[in-house]
Structure formats: structure tokens, C-alpha cells
Image (spheres, coloured by chain):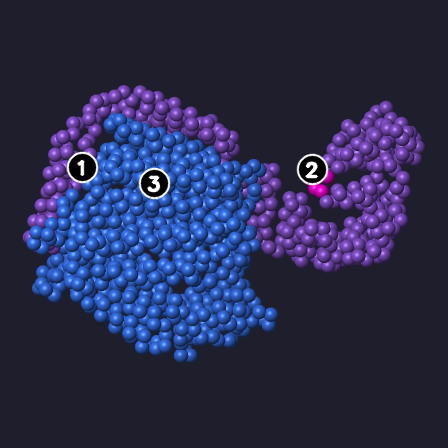
């Protein structure tokens, strides 16, 4: 509100300033030649001063004076010959233009380009009162760390936030600092390795491998480290070793581990046995996975949507597919389509009753994903 | 709220400018004084509005308000306060706002100090100023709005370009813009005269002070930019014939020509039409410079961002104003009354000679700058017109002008005596020759041209002194009388002498550095020494340091002369953390007018550092000369009295024709 009051006052002030001369009684316009007369008079006076100071001789002065005097005479005559322009005309149009145009253009253009709803956001004020502002929380942590660069807990806290915000390079540096100060943990090492991998565009560098191995030595069954190390072997072209590593990962994983499809696709590419049964229809083919990895964001979502709907179609025709129901419920949950997930759960329970082994698995998955199974099935 | 208020003030300034571009011009056309008066108020009002707007942007920068895109992209919470202020124009949007602010500042000055101009002239001048202002205000609002916001606001800025984090940024752009944009007043005067179809005596009287003010600022701005590039970029060069430098140099050359032709017009009412044309050309070159720098056609530290819409927009402004003004000139110049006549050998003649050479030089620089761009646009071929082209063509063009400079002030108005002037200059010529021979003998085998160049510089300084001495009548008159006359001399005479001597001083600096500079590139380990300019440099070792927003590696050197340590200094390389950009902070030590310049290269594999050492004899003369020129301009400007050129009477009755 205050903003609009100030804006109106400013606009009004400018309008008044412009209107005042337009409303004043019309004075006579001066004759341009009268200014010439003034200049020539000045010139004559100047010549006299110079002569008095001895800067020019009497002879020169007389000659110059004669020249200026000739111009002065001509200008004087021109002044006399020009009739003074008087004549007061109404300036109503000009006045109206000022009153209408100024606020109109000002407001239109401002509303089109400005953000009157946004208050100022000086950094000091935001720092004093951060609220929910994630950027300012990061900035605050950063400023704190500039002052206390040896505060490992701070780096530990900041690193995953950086990663989520897409500031991968900063995330890597923060993990590195946390490891340096607080010592390595599997979490920090794996986070550091993931930052390095993201930075190199998916390539698992030697540095990343070292971190992963160190992490694996501390937490031997960490599937994330195992997966990346296996992938590193694949990237190096060590097919046999990569296959062995992936197979080991499959063996140590729970049957419904979400990373299994990805591992399986690698295994398929490496020509190994796809450990988990792949009879479930609608599993992404090798080509699909490769395509999904090449895409990002919206494209990938669209592809997943497409695969989910084709899977739903297949399940409608052949409901006797436990694997299929497990996957579609999980997919719906990932896509945040809770209602569809609940509906899929209901249909799956029709094929595999809640009392059966499969039915219990479906219910367990649903509760893990936070999907309401509905009263009727209980 | 302050930010949005600044945004609104900018919009309102545009609206006021549009009114200012119409009302006074209509008033002048219909002879209505009230309408003309409203132009005066509008000029002052729009300047105040833009000052508010600029203040709001400054507030956003100083308080690190990262919800403003411009602040987020070009500032950082940790940079020193000075750079938060200067960072306001250390980017495209802010610098355009500064450009507009200065344009409106000059309009307001005309409105306030233009009381002694005829009403119609003042109204038209303000109208034309407002046309330019409207075009640029639209440009800012439509393509480069400094008040654009971003939600959610980032927590930290992306930092100011590290190269710009220097005191130079606080001084160089405002000075340069005061010069660039100052010529807009001359342009508006010229267009107003064309609209009016008449050049009054008052017109002639008031163009020169505006030109002089703009020229002095531009001189200072260019010199500052050159010195800044010299110490910041770490290449040890002071002028690269870079298109961006040429963009500022062309208006300076044309402005220098304008300054001299305006002189003839003020004192002798001659060269009127030519002055009008020069005024249009000078500001056109300023606009061209703005286009080259701001459109992103050229990549340099000055092109903050490249965005084709901006380039097209400025190109349209450029064509509109240059094309419009030149067409107006073509149609209306015939209506202007030509000025007085004069003999070829006369002060006027000398000034015409000056104008011819300066405009040719401008054309040369223009060709050299635009030809590669045009060729690339037409055929896609990339060529580079470098210093060899400019040094040869420009240098050869300037030579006859520099020789003639001391003659000019000694020639009489209307008809002069060349031989007499040469006789009166014998002392200066002699001094130049003696010094040239001295330099040649001292450096026997050294370049002959260098000795000649330094001699020329001395001769120009001597010529300036001769002019003052002769005017005071020293030698002919008793000492007391001469002293009294010296004191009574118009300040503009001292201004002329200072500026001309300044050119000589700059010339000496340029020639000395070009001919006698030494460059040494060595790999040094701590404890090693190197020789330069008669000094011994001892490398002590490296030290790591930390600034507010950068880390640095600094090398320490002792300077020894004859085995004794006379001085010591640091030379460093910095990495600015936010942009991960390196800069060189060269170590510079001054000895008299000469400098020792050391910049760090990369570490060599064996643990040594690559170090570049320059000895730059008399390099400070280059900028000292420009300071003299600028002081000359200021002294001349302070002389508010009207000067009349006293014509020389023709011998016998050899009438040269009417003086009108």
C-alpha cells in the first residue's frame, strides 16, 4: 500500500512540475537575434579590456572592433525588423497530454515489467530472519564455514544439500572437507564418489573408485559402492570381472531391491545370466534402459509413463503376474500417483489374495510405500 | 519496495522524456513559450527521476539484494564495499543506466545553464536530447532491465568479474561516459541549428564550452582506461588498437577536430557548417562505440553479455540517429549562412589543416576497426587488423599534424605569416634538434626514428612555451611589463599551451617506451637474480595469501642497485573463488617517469617460476601528457570570458572579401 502511495505522490509531483509552465500566463517569446546583439556587445567589451591590458595594439583593436560593430549593426536591424511574437494560445492539449499520458504510460509499462508484490530482500535482513529460505540457509552455512573452515560437521551437513541443489562441484569439495576433518565414513565416501561421478558425466574415475573401495572396506555390504565398482569394471571393458561383480550384487540383494532392474540390464549387456526371472512382461528392454539413461527430466518421465501404461495394459489381460503387480505399484508410487497405486494394489490382491504369500508381499510393499490398501481387504 | 520504486522511477523518467521530446519542439515550431518552458522542467524532472532510479539500484547492490537478477549476477556479499558501489555499472544493464543518467545530467545542465540561449534553440536542443534519452530508456526497459527480479532469491551472488574488481572501475566508466555522452549536447546543438535553419552568434559561443568539457572528460576516461589495462592485464601493454579502444578513440579524434573548429567559429564566425557536421559525426562515433561495445559484436572485457536482440536494438537506434541527423544535414545545411573568409596561411587555415588530418585519422581508425567485422559478416572470413596497420597509417598521418601544432597558435587570424612563425619557433626547433641528436649519440646505433620522435616531442613542448613567452612580450618589453601581460593573458591561452605541451609529453613517452623498452622472460628459483633497466631483481620466494573473495600466490622481489637493496615489491596471481577466474596483479615500481613491471607466469616443472620482467622507460609520460591535456581543457573551460580573434589587417587594400 505504502508503495502505491509513494508512486502516486511521485507521479503527481512530476505532473505538477510539467504543468506549471504550461499554466503560467504566456510571456513573450524572445527574438533570437537579441541574443546575437548580447554576444556582440560582450565581444566589444572584451576587445576594450584587451586593449587596456595591452594585449592587442590600438591598430588591431580598431580593426577588430570595426568587424564586430558591423555584425552588431546587422543583428540590431534584424531585431527591429522582427515583430515580437505574442499571442497566447491555449495549451489545453498539452496539459491534457501531461495529465493523461504520464500516469498511463508509467503504470502500463511498470505493471508489464515490474513486480510490485515483491519486497526488497537485502542480504542482512534475510540472514537475520532466514525462515524457510533454503538458499539463505546454505549461504549462512557458507559464511560460517568461511570463518571456521575446520568445522567438519558443517561440511557434512552442507554436502548432501549441495548435491540436491545441483551444485555438484561444491558438494564434492564439501564431502572432501568433511572426510578430511571428521574422517571417512561409508556415507561421506560414497557421497564424495557420487559427486565425482556426476562431475565427470557418469564416468567412474580412479579417484572415485578409491573412495568407493575405501567405503566398501568399512561397510562390506553397501550395494551402492558395489554397484559403482562393478560399473567401473564394465566401463574399463573388463567384461568378465564386471559380470562377476554384478552377479555378486544380485546375490546379496533382496529380491525386490529397486536397483535390480538396472543391474539386470547391465548383466544382459554383458551377456551374463539375468539372475532374477525376467518373465514378468513389460520389463524395460536393454534398449529402453539405454534410451532412458540418455534422456533426462521430462523425457525420461514421459518414457516411464509410457512403460507403466503398457505394463498396466498387459496386467489387465494377464493378471496372474506377481512381479508385474509389484513393479507397477512401485512405479506409481515413484510417479506420485497414489490413487493409481492403491487401485493397482486392489487389483493385485484380487489375483493374489491377502492371505497368500504373494498377497502379503504386496501389502508389505504398499505399507512401505505409504499406500492405503483400503478397508475392504483387511 | 525501494527496488520496485527505482523501477517505477525509471519508467516515469521514460514517460517524462517522451513528453520532453515533443512539447518543446512543438513549442519552438509554433512560437509558444509555455511549451518551450515545459521542456526545461521536463529535463530537470527526468534527471531527478533517473537519479532516484540509479540510487535504488545502488541500494540493491550495496545491500546485496540477490532478488535483483542484476545484483545476483554481478555482485557477491563478500566483496569490499567500494566494489559494491562500482559494481553497479560493472555490468551491461547498470552501465546503460549510467549512460542514460549522464545523458539526462547533461540535459539538465543545458536546462539550468542555458538561460542565455535563444528560447527556440534551447527548446530544440532539449527536444533532441530527449529523443536520444527516450531511445535509450526504451532500450534499457525492453532489453536490459536492471530491475528484473528472481524468485526464490539466491543466497549468494555470482561475483563481479575479477578483472573489474579494481579502483579503476570506480573512475574509468563514469569519466568515459561523461565524455562520450557529453558530445550529445554538441549533437543536439547541431541538430537544433539544422531544425531552426539558423546558426546564431549565441550558438557559436556556447558550443565550444560543451565540447571542451566533453573532450576533457573523454581524454581522462581513455587515459584512465589505458593505465588500468596496463597494470591489470599483466601484459605490460598500454594500448592494443583493440576495437573497443578504437571505439573510444574515434570520438576523441573527431572531438579534438570539433574542439578546434568550434574555436574558429567562436572567434571568427567561420567554418560554421563544417562544425555542425563535425558535431554530428562526433556523437555518431560515440553511438557507434556504444554499439560495438554493448552489442556483443566484439568480445572483450567490456562486452558483459552477448544478446542479439540488444545488438539489433542499438543498431536501430544508431541508424535512426546517425541517418536522421545526416539526412537533416543534407537537406538543411544549404539554408545555413556560411561564415567568414580567410587566407590559407592563417590561424583559421592551420585549424582547417588540423581538422583535415584528424578526420582522415578518424576515418583510418574506423576502417581498420570495422573492416574485419564487415568482412566477417559478408564472407565469414576472419581477419585481424592489428597494431602494424594502425601504427604505420595512423603514425604517418599524425606526423605532419604534430609538426604543425606549434605553428598554429603563432599564426595571426585571417592571414598569417608562416616564415615569421617559423622564425619565432627557432628556439623550440633548436631544442628539439639538440635533444634528438643527444638521444641519438647517447644510444648510438639505436633507432634513428626514436631520436627524431623524442626531438619532435621536445619541439612541441618548446613551441607551447614559445607561444606563451611571445604573447607576454618577454624579451621585447621590460620584465615588469611582460609579467603584467603574462598575468593578463586569457586563461584559454594557457589552456592551449598546456594541452599542446601535453601532446608532446605523451609523444615522448610513446616513442621512448616503444624504442627502448626491454622485456625479459626467465625461469627463476628463489635466490636467483635478473637484470632490467640497470637494476637487479632478486626473487625471494612465494607466499600464499587469502583475500575476502580470492586466494593468491604472491612472489616477493628485492630490487638492488649496485648490490644495495633499494626497494622491494610483490607480484601475484589471484584466483577469485566464486567465478574460479585467475587474474594477474603485476608488481610495478616507479623510478622517476620509468617503471619496472613484473608479472608472474606459470610454475615451471622444475619448481621454478616463469617470470616476465619489463623495463619501461618514461612510460608515465604517456599518461602524464594526457593529464596535461585534461588540465589544459579545464583551464580553458574556466575562462568564461568571451574571446574574439583579432584579425590581421590586410596590407595595402588587398581586400579578402567581406568578413561576413
Residue A35 bears which disc, if any? Answer: 1
- Tell me which corner region of the image, top left, top right, bottom left or bottom right, holds residue A340: top right
Horizontal and vertical percent position of residue B532: 43, 73
Residue A298 bears which disc, if any? Answer: 2
Q: Quadrant of the C terminus of chain B?
A: top left
**Residue at 16% across, 48% down:** B644
Of discs 2 and 1, which sits in the foreground? Answer: 1
Q: Is residue B596 left or right of residue A36?
A: right
Mark 1 is surrounded, within 10 Å at the Cα level, by few (under 14), some (14 to 19) or many (20 or more) other residues, namely: many
Q: Is residue B643 left or right of residue B194?
A: left
Question: Do callouts 3 and 2 mark residues in contact (Cβ within 8 Å)?
Answer: no
> Are the residues under marks 2 and 1 on the same chain?
yes
Horizontal and vertical percent position of residue A333: 77, 34
Which chain is home to disc 1? A
Task: Find numbered disc 2 in the image and state the secondary structure of the residue it sits on.
Answer: helix
Horizontal and vertical percent position of residue A144: 58, 50
- Tell me which corner region of the image, top left, top right, bottom left or bottom right, holds residue A351: top right
Q: Is residue B118 left or right of residue A243?
A: left
Which region of the structure is painted magenta?
A295-300
**Residue at 52% across, 53% down:** B381
Which chain is home to disc 3? B
Q: Dot 3 corresponds to which residue? A: B326
Task: Find numbered disc 1 in the image and state the secondary structure of the residue it sits on.
Answer: helix
> Are the residues under marks 3 and 1 on the same chain?
no
Amino acid at each position: 500500500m505504502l508503495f502505491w502511495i509513494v508512486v502516486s505522490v511521485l507521479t503527481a509531483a512530476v505532473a505538477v512540475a510539467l504543468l506549471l509552465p504550461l499554466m503560467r500566463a504566456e510571456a513573450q517569446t524572445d527574438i533570437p537575434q537579441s541574443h546575437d546583439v548580447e554576444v556582440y556587445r560582450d565581444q566589444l567589451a572584451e576587445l576594450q579590456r584587451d586593449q587596456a591590458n595591452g594585449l592587442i595594439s590600438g591598430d588591431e583593436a580598431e580593426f577588430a572592433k570595426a568587424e564586430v560593430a558591423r555584425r552588431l549593426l546587422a543583428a540590431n536591424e534584424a531585431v527591429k525588423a522582427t515583430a515580437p511574437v505574442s499571442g497566447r494560445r491555449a495549451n489545453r492539449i498539452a496539459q491534457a497530454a501531461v495529465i493523461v499520458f504520464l500516469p498511463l504510460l508509467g503504470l502500463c509499462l511498470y505493471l508489464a515489467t515490474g513486480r510490485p508484490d515483491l519486497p526488497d530482500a537485502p542480504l542482512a535482513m534475510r540472514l537475520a530472519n532466514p525462515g524457510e529460505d533454503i538458499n539463505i540457509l546454505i549461504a549462512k552455512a557458507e559464511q560460517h564455514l568461511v570463518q571456521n573452515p575446520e568445522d567438519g560437521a558443517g561440511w557434512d551437513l552442507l554436502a548432501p544439500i549441495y548435491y540436491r541443489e545441483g551444485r555438484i562441484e561444491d558438494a564434492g569439495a564439501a564431502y572432501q572437507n568433511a572426510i578430511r576433518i571428521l574422517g571417512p565414513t561409508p556415507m561421506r565416501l560414497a557421497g564424495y564418489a557420487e559427486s565425482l561421478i556426476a562431475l565427470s558425466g557418469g564416468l567412474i574415475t580412479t579417484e572415485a573408485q578409491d573412495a568407493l573401495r575405501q567405503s566398501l572396506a568399512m561397510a562390506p555390504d553397501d550395494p551402492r559402492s558395489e554397484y559403482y565398482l562393478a560399473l567401473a569394471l564394465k566401463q574399463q571393458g573388463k567384461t568378465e570381472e564386471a559380470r562377476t561383480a554384478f552377479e555378486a550384487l544380485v546375490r546379496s540383494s533382496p529380491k525386490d531391491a529397486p536397483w535390480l532392474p538396472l543391474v539386470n540390464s547391465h548383466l544382459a549387456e554383458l551377456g551374463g545370466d539375468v539372475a532374477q526371472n525376467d518373465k514378468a512382461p513389460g520389463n524395460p528392454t536393454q534398449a529402453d534402459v539405454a534410451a532412458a539413461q540418455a534422456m533426462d527430466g521430462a523425457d525420461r518421465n514421459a518414457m516411464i509413463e509410457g512403460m507403466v501404461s503398457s505394463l498396466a495394459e498387459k496386467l489387465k489381460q494377464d493378471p496372474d503376474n506377481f512381479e508385474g503387480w509389484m513393479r507397477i505399484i512401485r512405479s506409481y508410487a515413484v510417479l506420485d500417483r497414489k490413487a493409481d497405486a492403491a487401485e493397482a494394489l486392489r487389483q493385485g490382491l484380487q489375483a493374489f489374495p491377502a492371505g497368500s504369500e504373494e498377497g502379503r508381499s504386496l501389502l508389505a510393499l504398499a505399507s512401505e510405500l505409504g499406500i492405503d490398501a483400503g478397508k475392504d481387504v483387511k | 519496495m525501494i527496488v520496485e520504486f527505482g523501477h517505477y522511477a525509471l519508467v516515469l523518467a521514460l514517460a517524462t522524456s517522451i513528453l520532453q521530446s515533443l512539447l518543446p519542439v512543438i513549442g519552438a515550431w509554433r512560437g509558444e513559450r509555455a511549451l518551450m518552458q515545459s521542456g526545461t522542467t521536463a529535463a530537470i524532472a527526468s534527471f531527478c527521476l533517473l537519479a532516484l532510479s540509479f540510487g535504488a539500484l545502488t541500494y540493491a547492490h550495496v545491500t546485496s539484494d540477490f532478488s535483483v537478477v542484476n545484483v545476483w549476477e554481478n555482485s557477491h556479499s563478500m566483496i569490499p564495499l567500494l566494489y559494491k558501489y562500482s559494481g553497479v555499472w560493472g555490468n551491461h544493464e547498470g552501465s546503460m543506466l549510467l549512460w542514460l543518467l549522464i545523458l539526462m545530467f547533461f540535459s539538465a545542465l543545458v536546462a539550468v545553464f542555458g538561460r542565455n540561449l535563444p528560447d527556440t534553440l534551447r527548446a530544440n536542443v532539449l527536444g533532441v536530447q530527449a529523443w536520444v534519452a527516450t531511445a535509450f530508456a526504451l532500450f534499457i526497459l525492453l532489453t536490459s532491465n536492471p530491475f528484473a527480479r528472481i524468485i526464490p532469491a539466491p543466497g549468494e551472488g555470482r561475483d563481479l568479474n575479477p578483472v573489474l574488481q579494481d579502483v579503476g572501475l570506480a573512475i574509468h566508466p563514469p569519466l568515459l561516459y561523461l565524455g562520450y555522452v557529453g558530445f550529445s549536447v554538441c549533437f543536439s546543438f547541431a541538430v537544433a541549428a539544422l531544425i531552426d535553419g539558423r546558426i546564431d552568434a549565441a550558438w557559436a559561443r556556447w558550443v565550444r564550452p560543451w565540447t571542451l568539457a566533453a573532450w576533457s572528460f573523454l581524454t581522462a576516461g581513455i587515459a584512465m582506461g589505458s593505465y588500468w589495462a596496463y597494470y591489470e592485464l599483466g601484459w605490460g601493454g598500454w594500448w592494443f588498437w583493440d576495437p573497443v579502444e578504437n571505439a573510444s578513440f574515434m570520438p576523441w579524434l573527431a572531438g579534438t577536430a570539433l574542439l578546434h573548429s568550434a574555436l574558429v567559429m567562436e572567434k571568427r564566425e567561420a567554418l560554421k557548417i563544417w562544425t555542425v557536421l563535425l558535431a554530428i559525426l562526433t556523437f555518431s562515433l560515440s553511438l557507434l562505440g556504444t554499439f560495438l561495445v554493448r552489442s556483443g559484436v566484439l568480445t572483450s572485457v567490456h562486452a558483459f553479455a552477448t544478446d542479439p536482440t540488444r545488438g539489433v536494438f542499438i543498431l536501430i537506434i544508431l541508424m535512426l540517429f546517425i541517418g536522421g541527423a545526416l539526412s537533416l544535414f543534407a537537406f538543411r545545411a544549404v539554408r545555413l549562412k556560411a561564415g567568414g573568409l580567410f587566407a590559407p596561411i592563417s590561424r583559421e587555415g592551420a585549424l582547417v589543416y588540423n581538422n583535415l588530418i584528424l578526420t582522415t585519422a578518424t576515418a583510418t581508425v574506423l576502417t581498420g576497426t570495422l573492416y574485419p567485422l564487415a568482412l566477417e559478416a559478408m564472407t565469414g572470413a576472419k581477419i585481424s587488423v592489428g597494431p602494424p596497420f594502425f601504427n604505420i597509417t595512423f603514425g604517418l598521418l599524425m606526423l605532419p599534424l604534430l609538426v604543425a601544432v606549434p605553428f598554429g597558435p603563432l599564426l595571426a587570424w585571417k592571414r598569417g605569416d608562416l616564415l615569421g612563425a617559423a622564425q619565432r619557433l627557432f628556439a623550440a626547433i633548436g631544442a628539439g634538434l639538440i635533444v634528438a641528436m643527444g638521444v641519438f649519440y647517447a644510444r648510438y646505433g639505436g633507432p634513428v626514428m626514436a631520436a627524431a620522435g623524442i626531438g619532435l616531442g621536445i619541439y612541441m613542448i618548446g613551441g607551447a612555451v614559445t607561444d606563451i613567452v611571445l604573447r607576454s612580450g618577454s624579451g621585447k618589453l621590460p620584465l615588469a611589463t611582460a609579467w603584467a601581460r603574462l598575468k593578463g593573458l586569457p586563461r584559454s591561452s594557457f589552456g592551449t599551451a598546456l594541452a599542446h605541451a601535453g601532446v608532446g609529453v605523451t609523444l615522448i613517452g610513446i616513442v621512448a617506451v616503444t624504442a627502448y623498452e626491454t622485456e625479459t622472460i626467465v625461469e627463476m628459483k628463489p635466490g636467483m637474480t635478473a637484470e632490467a633497466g640497470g637494476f637487479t631483481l632478486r626473487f625471494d620466494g612465494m607466499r600464499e595469501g587469502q583475500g575476502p573473495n580470492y586466494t593468491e600466490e604472491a612472489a616477493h622481489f628485492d630490487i638492488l642497485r649496485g648490490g644495495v637493496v633499494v626497494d622491494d615489491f610483490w607480484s601475484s596471481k589471484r584466483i577469485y573463488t566464486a567465478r574460479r577466474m585467475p587474474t594477474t596483479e603485476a608488481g610495478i615500481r616507479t623510478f622517476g617517469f620509468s617503471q619496472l613491471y613484473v608479472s608472474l607466469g606459470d610454475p615451471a616443472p622444475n619448481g621454478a617460476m616463469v617470470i616476465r620482467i619489463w623495463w619501461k622507460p618514461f612510460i608515465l609520460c604517456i599518461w602524464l601528457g594526457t593529464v596535461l591535456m585534461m588540465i589544459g581543457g579545464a583551464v580553458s573551460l574556466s575562462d568564461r570570458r568571451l574571446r574574439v580573434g583579432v584579425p590581421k589587417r590586410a596590407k595595402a587594400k588587398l581586400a579578402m572579401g567581406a568578413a561576413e
